[in-house]
Image (cartoon, grey):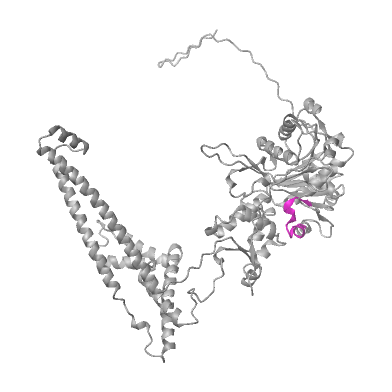
Amino acid sequence: MEIELIELKDIKATPDIIHSYPQRVKSECTSLVIDNGSYNCRVGWATEKEPQLMYKNLIAKPRKERGKKDGEPQVGNDIANIEAVRFQLKTQFDRNVVTHFEAQEQIFDYTFTHMGIDTEGSVNHPIILTEAFLNPNYSRNLMAELLFECYNVPSIAYGVDCLFSYQHNNCPPDGLIVSIGYHTTHIIPILDGKADAMNARRINVGGYHITSYMHRLLQLKYPVHVNAITPSRAEELIHEYSMIALSYQEEVSKWADVDHYDSNVLRVQLPYIAPTAAPGLTLEQQKERKRELARRLMEINARKREERLAEDEEQLNQLLAVQDLLEEGELDEFDQALKSYSLANEADLIKMINNLQAKVERTRQKIVAANSQEENIVMEEQKPKIKSSLQPKDQQDFDEWIAGVRKKRQEILDKRMAKRQRRQDMAKRRTAAAQERMRIISQLARKEKRDDDFGMRDEDWDVYKVINREGGDSDSELEQEKLLELEDVLRHHDPEFDSAGSNVPMVPGETHQLHVGVERLRAPELLFQPSMVGSVEAGIAETIEYVLKQYSAEEQNRLVSNVFLTGGPTAFPGLLERLKRELREMRPFGSNFQVNIAKNTSLDAWYGARDFGLNGNLPEYLVSRKEYEEKGGEYFKEHSTSNTYTRSPDPLPMIQTPVTSEREVIVEWKASDAVVDVEIE
């Protein structure tokens, strides 16, 4: 059966174009709809069917290089290779709440520029902006300040993304929203068309945690490919191939079966560079190459010796010239020369001359010895070794001879494999080889010796050999030569011999493959079991059950009559069936419930905000600049898809305490009676 390999797409982001600024949009002051999600940002005019911009809410600021100006920050789809700047990435979000407004300003600059808005100093369009459920007032206050003060927008309307999606799908007035985002998951009950914020709950688990968990699982499973397994590739595996199990424990137990594993495992091919197949060298060519390398090495060493000899002879001549100055009676020049060579007196000079003469003589002897050694090597090359044991005696026993050569080659390969296996076993603590080695070492440690004389006796070396025998030695050069010689014979005389040296053909890139099996189920299971990553929070099913218990039986029936799933991660295959099974287990026997999913889990929030912008009642819900200045940035007008406005309490009044003027404070400490005298005016 042919093994199916999956190639990773490694899709690179395509930079966004700068859209044209239609005159009709400019003249009519059409609303600009911004779905400001913590993963993706979607922007478009309210009169368009689809958003014009879709990009990741990320900013990458390149590192400043010495002597160069600061690089321009890259936003969204302008980041061509996200892994190259992974450690320079930042976002305006802290979980699902905007807190870093300097980053948000750069995002808005990118948005308005690529939407083609070219008006000077202002954006003359009402802004419809999505925000988190129960968004804090301080975040909304700073967002309004940024839009009104920096971009001079005429008005703003806020709405909750999951409520926009709920309304766009024409859901009934009663329901239970399960909104799974990038950082958080919300369970929001809807009764009579209003969100019940008091009984809503948030789980701090989302798509980011699923991707991060998959990334860690694969890196732990394949530590040799830790750099090739990037978050972007883990995200691709999550989006394309992951699923949610109907019954997690049952599905995981199936993977223990070998047949189930082989038929369902996902084989992912990592990118790799295939080694260039160098033409195989014959034994004679390899020997000739080795001799050539030896000759080159000897030539390099001889050149270095000659250079060293020339330097030493030159220095020796200079010192002899200094000695001649003393003999000629030129003492001043002699003293200056001694100082230049850092010598104290004549004795040091004579000692240095003797050392240099001995060194020059030794170098000359080495050069003579090296030349004679080269002649010996040339003589040895003229006497090639002929191994008659590798040649057949006659034609009759040719097959037996070939079989014997194959056997010898296989014995060397088996010996190598056994050595490698022993080395691997030695690295593991629980193997028999490692335990035997530790037993011998512990016996040695138990012997009471005053002096450390291990190695002085022959039996000590026998113990040392026993310890190291299991680890094996590296492949010796003699073994390698023997193996190459046998393979050369087989290559010339055995037509069935594989020149690659292996009877089992290796699939190209097999060592760069990931086998993704149970990880496809484990990572998305975080939505139902956050404890798998150490979180103490409850999963979706437990949270839904807790929320339902806050209501009467009649209200519970109204809520479960429409359980609505929205958000990007709700597109996981199997989530709908899993949630139905969980509800069937928690609801009374025979009761009815309905689970629905958004038509487009990622874009329905923008579609709902667009529908809101096309509503004739939009001006009633827009906060103008005048209202912003009067009531503050946290103020907004409520509607069916917005949060509930709760005004922040006024700051406590400052109580002014009377200040007494202290002219002088004198503290006296007496060790005898420990009396403190304080004089205050």
**Residue 42 drawn above or below residue 434:** above
Left or right, residue 323 beside residue 585: left
Drawn side of residue 427 relative to residue 181, left or right: left
Residue 619, given in percent of the width and then of the height, sits at 86, 34
As drawn, which residue projects farthest toward the top?
Answer: 681
Please provide the residue range marked out in magenta: 565-579
Q: Quadrant of the C terminus?
A: top right
Q: Position of residue 169 (x, y in %)?
A: 84, 50
Image vertical order of residue 75 relative to residue 402, above or below? above
439 relative position to 168: left or right: left
Task: Examine the image and state in which quarter residue 242 appears.
Answer: bottom right
Total numbered labels: 0
Q: In the rendered structure, does residue 49 fall within the stretch colored magenta?
A: no
Residue that extends furthest to the front in the rendered view of this protein: 328
Residue at 50% across, 77% down: 498
Question: Does residue 577 belong to the magenta stretch?
Answer: yes
